[in-house]
Image: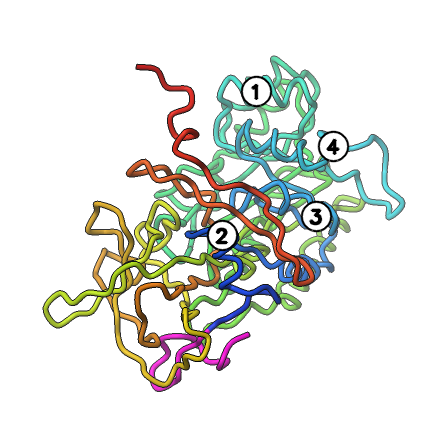
Amino acid sequence: MTTTASPPGQPGLQPVIRTSIAGASVADLARTHGTPLYVYDAEMIRRRCRDLAAWDTVRFAQKACSNLAVLALMRGEGVMVDAVSTGEIHRALAAGYAPHAAPGVGGDGLPPVHPIVYTADIFDRESLDAVAKLGIHVNCGSADMIEQLAERVPGAGITLRVNPGFGHGHSQKTNTGGEGSKHGIWHEEIPDVLRRAEWAGLAVTGLHMHIGSGADLAHLAEVAGALERVALEIGRSLTTISAGGGLPVPYKPGEVHADLSGYFTLWDAVRKRLEERFGHRLRLEIEPGRYLTAESGFVITEVRAVKKQGGRKYLLVDAGFNTLARPVLYGSYHPMSLCPADPRATAAATEDVAVGGPLCESGDIFTQTDGGFVATRALPTAAVGDLLVIEIAGAYGFVMASNYNSKPLPAEVLVDGGVARLVRRRQTPEDLVRGETV
């Protein structure tokens, strides 16, 4: 529960005290599993999956949150999965996904859906071995991948990931389109790439575009027109078109969710025009990552020191950018709330504080803006032993965690129906040196 619905740090509004996550006590979670700790709300993930039920296929970009329990939950919701490495292919198989689609046409008249798609700009040798051995469908982000796949899997169908010449995202580092991005096949090279695919004996059956993570809906809508133009160049070999991902998630006060109904209507119109042109059905996919898991995730961390540096007050917690890297990488904003050690405490007294971690790095600050400038957040007055909860941390959170400063990776817990289940144990110091020799 929370004492107020107002987001923490919003000017003029009382910040949040949070005592539970999805019906599980924050204090009990920390006591049982230690801190820092990742916690996921299973019902929130299900809700976000069902938000996209209008699409023929929802394909989860598992790089956002690849815990096996989360992947299995997605599979239970009928969500397919995208893999960007051999390790992610292995994760998808371990979570119960089949490596490839059954042949034939489904009862809905659509072409079969690929349970796993390998999406990348290159094949490393392990990933090429894996897709060839397992029969996994490939989304090619470079022309060189076409010949490399043809040598191992003659006659395969492939998807082309096309860079439309423009991109957008919440940070330049998450922009995946335009000349500044390494991703995808440049749109002007499509005729040459089609000739190379034909020469190699591969059929282009899918088309995929993705311009950036956290892009606004206006920029996402531009992708539809660009994809339609490229689809007409490719022709009727296409059986699947993918709108990619990038659906924005509201992190800051005042931000809202995208108009999903309007976005689907836009893409469905593109699909219908192409179906009329090609004379057969097309499968319409969307490939979200952040949208499905961001809001489900929380980091619970303990306040270990309160100190003043000149006129600025700092709360120092036991999580750092080794735990959650988004603030140091992108200057990302995450809502925060407090779970006081004293259950009788209220949010009546508040103060502006900077929140930092334990690492031997000046950049180890959770309240920073793009460029590394330290900012402050209005939070209830905190003391050592209180728990700070960093919210909307379920995407690009644990998956980007590291062992920097030889810090063990945190545990992960999935809360479903108020019941908390450990889905990854905390690393131990012994785990840190396993595989090393003197």
Q: Earlier in the sequence, mark 1 or mark 3?
A: 3
Q: Amino acid at mark 1?
A: Leu
Which percent across, then down, holds residue 429?
39, 33
Disc 2 + disc 1, Cβ < 8 Å = no
**Residue bearing mark 3:** 79
Q: Earlier in the sequence, mark 4 or mark 3?
A: 3
Give the residues drawn in magenta, as a range. 1-17
**In which quadrant of the rendered image does the C terminus lie?**
top left
Q: Is residue 217 left or right of residue 159?
A: left
- Label 2 packing within 10 angstroms: few (<14), some (14-19), many (20+): many
**Residue bearing mark 1:** 128
- Label 4 packing within 10 angstroms: few (<14), some (14-19), many (20+): some
| CA separation in Å, label 4 and label 2 | 28 Å
Return the residue nearer the eye: 234 or 111.
Answer: 111
Q: Is residue 264 visible?
A: no
Q: Is residue 167 left or right of residue 260?
A: left
Disc 4 + disc 2, Cβ < 8 Å = no
Q: Secondary structure at mark 3?
A: loop
**Residue bearing mark 2:** 38
Q: Is residue 287 magenta?
A: no
- Residue at the extreme right of the image, as rendered: 107
The label on residue 98 is 4
Q: Is residue 185 visible?
A: yes
Q: Amino acid at mark 4?
A: Ala
**Which colouring convention does the figure follow?**
rainbow
